[in-house]
Amino acid sequence: MAHSKPSLFTGLRSNIFAGFVVSLIALPLALGLAIASGFPPIAGIIASVVGGVLVAVLGGSYVTITGPGNGLVVVLLGAVTVLGEGDAQVGYLYALAAVILSGVLLLIFGFLRFGALSDFFPATAIQGMLSAIGITILLKQFYVMLGDLETKGSALELVLGIPDLLLRLISEASSGQLYAAAIGVLSLLIMVFYSKITNRFFHLVPAPMWVVVLALGFDAYATYLGDGNPISGALLISLPDNLLTSVPTPNFSKWQEPAFWGVVLSITLISSIESLLSIKAVDKLDPEKRRSNTNKDMKALGIATIVSGFLGGMNVVTVIARSSVNVNNQATRRVSNFFHALFLFVMVLVFQEQLRRIPLTALAAILVYTGYKLSAPEIFVRMYRIGKEQLFIFLTTLVATLLTDLITGILIGLLATFVVHVVLNKAFWLFSRNLLKPNVLMYKEGETQKYYVGIIHFCTFLNFYKLKAKLDKIPQNAQAVVDFSLCSFVDHTVQESLNNYEELFVRKGGSVEIIGLDVHQTDSSHPFAVRTLRPMEKLRVFGGGRTKRQHQLEALAVEKEWGYQDTPKTKKLLLQKYIGYGTTSVERVYNQLSNVENSIFLFDIKYSEGVFIAKESVQTTFLHIKLKNEIPVFSFDREMLLEKLSSLAGFHDIDFPKNPTFSRDFYVRGNNPKAVREFFSEELISFFSAYGFYHVMSNGNDLIVRQFLRTATPAEATAMIEFGLALKKKIEG
């Protein structure tokens, strides 16, 4: 019996509750972000309400929350300042027009299926841009938090002006400003120490709402004393008298000016990147393990932004922090976004008089903390741990964004990333020649039903979309093997994105295994560090830069009480002694596991076979079994097309008249057919029939076993060891 599709209102009670909790956080944030952007406070509420309603109905995500975003504060404030030429109200009307047109572009992007836009930006450069936004928000709002609404300037000027700000606050500030500043500082302390307070009843109310409670509590106390609120109206939230009729008229008169379209493009770029990154992150939190339709979401965000702009609101984007709170409060459907909007609307209508009593300093404190989280010192440390080159890209993008603007900053970040990649590879032509060429191959591996995805040349943010397109075609409950053996360079962005795929497939019951990176050089121990293929003589001892696969192989060795050595070396394995390997030359052996008796070895190997133009390099995993007794020389494999062609060429398949099915399904070669037939007892034939997907070769004293002409995954390596142990026991027993 087929299961019916869950209704939008499935789990209505939990979704209503989640929406209510999110609204408590969204209220002060929406007001604060609007003020920080140079928009009226109500503009943030409009974006939250319109976005919540429309995206809940039209969107392609499931548990995301929409509203004004942190990333747009800087660009919207710049739009108001530049377009208004010093007149904030005029600049606001021009900025509304830019917001509306950015919504149109987002809608077009959705129809053009630009949902993968974020894949073309290096992760480190994006992080640098976000940190620059965080620093800018922190510095600008720090002044507002202390009651200074007038001071403007660049990030450097604001930093240098802090001592003067504190001096003026002590010597010149009115009592009203001092009270406002005190509320701002206390609000910041609430945001900082909220997570460290262990009282569970305290945590029933989100930190931003405690800030509101503090502000309203001060107003109530001042009123109770009879003196009234000493904070001047200029430092309090300003709301229109009639919220439902006070709709501004956007001004499109500058549509022919390049500066206006520069603002439109900046808003569109930042809102799309912020939304797409947030959607990706929230998908990982989804309790039902669903995957959002990013193109559908972009259309919904575009429509919501257009409507919001015409009503006087900000851009509508997907926001990670509020979405995380939504998931943590048991949200399961888009309807939670709708209820968050509904509760916001009711709160603003019912409590607008109370909202007018909240000091701007309290909201600024929330944004100071938000800015700090975007640019915290831990981010700098994390970039360094990934790799010094990532720290360089991060700092370059951050500084460029602070000194110029967001578009220029991210473009400089892109250029810096490309230059770093070229320098690391010392091969400009590697990128220039192969950038537009197909570099990804995908197929199913025989009876195993595994999807094999092989990549050649290089894989970076520039061409990751090719790999992504293949991975998106694989059912998420299937097994996929991604092989970088023939790939000279894999960047940080690709590895971080592949980790997302690994997590997604696991949640759906499938798996993504990464192979072929074990001999690539890395300058840090971080799992997502840049990996570059170097010549054998330049390879250093592994350890710091081990791959996930190497850690899993080591864990396998520990589990079986075997030895493990990842260092490349030359193993004296004379493949020429085995049938079909007469022209083979071993280049390196690495990732070796060995039992205590040194009778069974599992290892990765790179060898070449053939000569001159027919020479071919192969990387695979072998199992080497040393036997106590002598056995016939033979080669055993499943009968495929290649084996049938070999028979036609004179390499005779040894038949077993008593086992016609075995003879039909498997290809056996040997120098002494009679001895081979005697060796393959009924018991051994049954054994091989059960494990027939392995290729087994004997030189008379030893056996080597492989499964595919590629490196084995940890799970496949485990299975090979179990097969080898059982085979050795069968032969020697």
Image (tube, grey):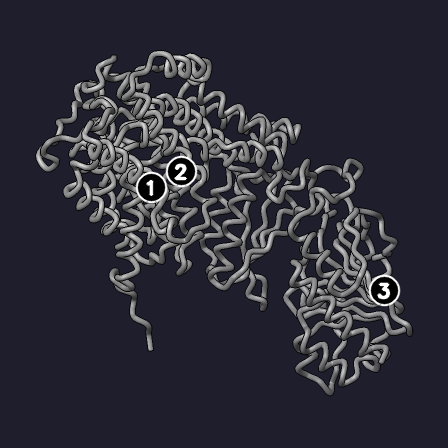
Q: Which mark is residue 210?
A: 1
Considering only vertical position in the picture, is 251 above or below 565? above
Q: Earlier in the sequence, mark 3 or mark 2?
A: 2
- Secondary structure of the residue carrying numbered label 2: helix
- Secondary structure of the residue carrying numbered label 1: helix
In the rendering, at what x and y percent does residue 676 appear? 83, 77
Q: Nearer the viewer, residue 417 or 469?
A: 417
Q: Residue at x 8, y 34 (%)?
A: 245
Q: Residue at x 45, y 17 (%)?
A: 159
Q: Nearer the viewer, residue 319 or 663?
A: 319
Instruction: Name the quadrant of the C terminus.
Output: bottom right
In the rendering, at what x and y percent does residue 452 appear? 57, 56
Residue identified by numbered label 3: 596
Most extreme residue toward the front, as rendered?
225
Instruction: Name the quadrant of the N terminus.
Output: bottom left
Tell me the CA gap for discs 1 and 2.
7 Å
Picture quadrant of residue 562: bottom right
